[in-house]
Image (cartoon, rainbow, N blue to C red):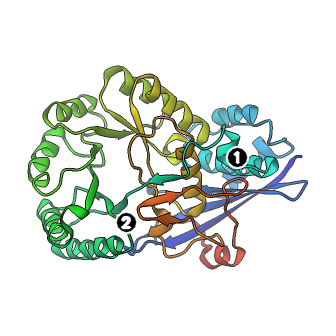
């Protein structure tokens, strides 16, 4: 079997918050009719957009004429050609391993040795509260999700501290201890002293399972300063083996937050998880808010990680109003169900894909 071509389709999907995220759906074609599906997720994060014609040519130079089952050589070549990693290499690897799973008639988890779990505990994101209006709208989102059986949430801090208090006070009045705060996420943009001051206020309402990105990412010692003062595990996004090594060596954090998009695909993400395991640290499955193809890939990754000790974040299948597959990834009472079937277990819906297809652009 040989790969014969690559198609990239940019799409735009609106979140329930009103924000629009842009993604790229990848199709790898073969001489035997099988198609590998991939996704470059939420590609507007950096404020500029990719030249998809150039990405397509790069993909084709690596893939066309190759047998996907010889994936190790392909992945090594991609690491050299696609050095920046991120969404470009992630979409490449998701499509490649979806295709391999289909060839072998097993899931992507099966390609990597088989699942250790059939569902992942996940949280629903509550984005920053900048005003009372934001807080009240987010209280409404919690009410709706709680009634659907989702009781675990992540709160992004960094908007307005008083608005966060309004939100947490309202949630506590409505749901008490039935509401579980998986994490307070400080997004790695605040000085550690400010984080400690905010925690003195926020922890009066709920004690989270963990804290996320608690200092400016250029200040690794700041992670440790928060850790000395707050008796909660700290998680940080880890996207490279060098970063994983530094975090493991210096014990800046307790948990590696690993997303495929951050790590650049399955293979690097699994290496990072192994570094954490060797150092006696834990992992959780992060997110950049994917559509169902990307969420399915995250689920496959999470299902094979041994030291997955904390709940994760991939709830894009709930977050977006539109998707591109016939049946979205499934959630049940706060768990992401690992899809069944060959590859990622996702089937593309061409009509849905066409309905939200839209050229990439960084400015609306």
Tell me: 198 left or right of 52. left
Residue at the extreme top of the image, as rendered: 249
Q: Position of residue 73 (x, y in %)?
A: 75, 31
Q: Residue at x 37, y 66 (%)?
A: 150
Q: Using the image, tell me which numbered label, if any, was put on residue 97.
A: 1
From what the image shows, is residue 255 above or below residue 303? above
Residue visible at 59% across and 47% down in the picture:
90
Helix, strand or loop at label 2? It is loop
Position of residue 302 measured from the top left corner of the image (x, y, whole percent): 52, 45
Seen at 41% across and 55% down, the residue is 122
Picture coordinates of residue 277, whole percent (x, y): 46, 28
Locate residue 170 relative to residue 236 in the image: left or right.
left
Which residue is at the front of the view, 34 or 299?
299
Is residue 329 depicted above or below 231 in this figure?
below
In this rendering, the count of numbered labels is 2
Q: Quadrant of residue 29?
A: bottom right
Find residue 334 and name its label: none
* Disc 1 crowd, CA 10 A, few/some/many (<14, 14-19, 20+): many
Is residue 267 shown above or below 342? above
User: Are discs 2 and 1 less than 8 Å apart at CB?
Assistant: no
Question: Residue 309: percent from the left, percent from the top?
Answer: 40, 40
| Tag shown at residue 150 | 2
Q: Residue at x 48, y 26 (%)?
A: 275
What's the distance in space between the residues labelled 2 and 1, CA to CA? Answer: 30 Å
Q: Secondary structure at mark 1?
A: helix
């Amino acid at each position: 079997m040989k790969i014969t071509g690559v198609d990239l389709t940019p799409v735009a999907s609106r979140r329930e918050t009103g924000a629009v995220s842009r993604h790229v759906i990848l199709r790898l074609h073969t001489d035997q009719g099988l198609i590998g599906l991939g996704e470059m997720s939420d590609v507007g994060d950096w404020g500029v957009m990719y030249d998809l014609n150039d990405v397509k040519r790069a993909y084709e130079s690596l893939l066309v004429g190759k047998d996907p089952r010889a994936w190790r050589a392909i992945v090594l070549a991609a690491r050299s050609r696609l050095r920046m990693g991120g969404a470009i290499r992630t979409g490449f690897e998701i499509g490649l391993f979806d295709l391999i799973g289909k060839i072998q008639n097993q899931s992507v988890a099966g390609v990597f040795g088989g699942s250790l779990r059939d569902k992942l505990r996940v949280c629903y994101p509550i984005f920053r509260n900048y005003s009372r209006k934001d807080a009240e709208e987010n209280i409404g989102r919690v009410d709706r999700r709680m009634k659907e059986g989702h009781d675990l949430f992540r709160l992004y801090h960094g908007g307005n501290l008083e608005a966060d208090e309004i939100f947490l006070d309202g949630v506590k009045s409505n749901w008490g201890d039935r509401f579980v705060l998986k994490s307070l996420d400080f997004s790695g943009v605040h000085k550690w002293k400010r984080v400690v001051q905010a925690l003195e206020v926020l922890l009066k309402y709920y004690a989270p399972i963990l804290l996320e990105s608690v200092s400016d990412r250029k200040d690794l010692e700041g992670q440790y300063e928060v850790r000395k003062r707050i008796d909660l595990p700290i998680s940080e996004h880890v996207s490279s083996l060098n970063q994983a090594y530094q975090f493991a060596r210096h014990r800046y954090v307790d948990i590696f937050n690993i997303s495929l998009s951050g790590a650049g695909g399955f293979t690097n993400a699994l290496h990072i998880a192994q570094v954490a395991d060797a150092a006696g640290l834990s992992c959780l499955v992060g997110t950049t808010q994917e559509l169902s193809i990307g969420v399915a890939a995250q689920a496959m990754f999470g299902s094979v990680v041994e030291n997955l000790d904390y709940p994760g974040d991939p709830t894009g299948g709930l977050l977006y109003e539109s998707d591109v597959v016939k049946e979205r990834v499934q959630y049940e009472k706060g768990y992401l169900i690992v899809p069944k079937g060959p590859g990622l277990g996702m089937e593309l819906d061409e009509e849905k894909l066409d309905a939200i297809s839209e050229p990439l652009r960084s400015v609306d």
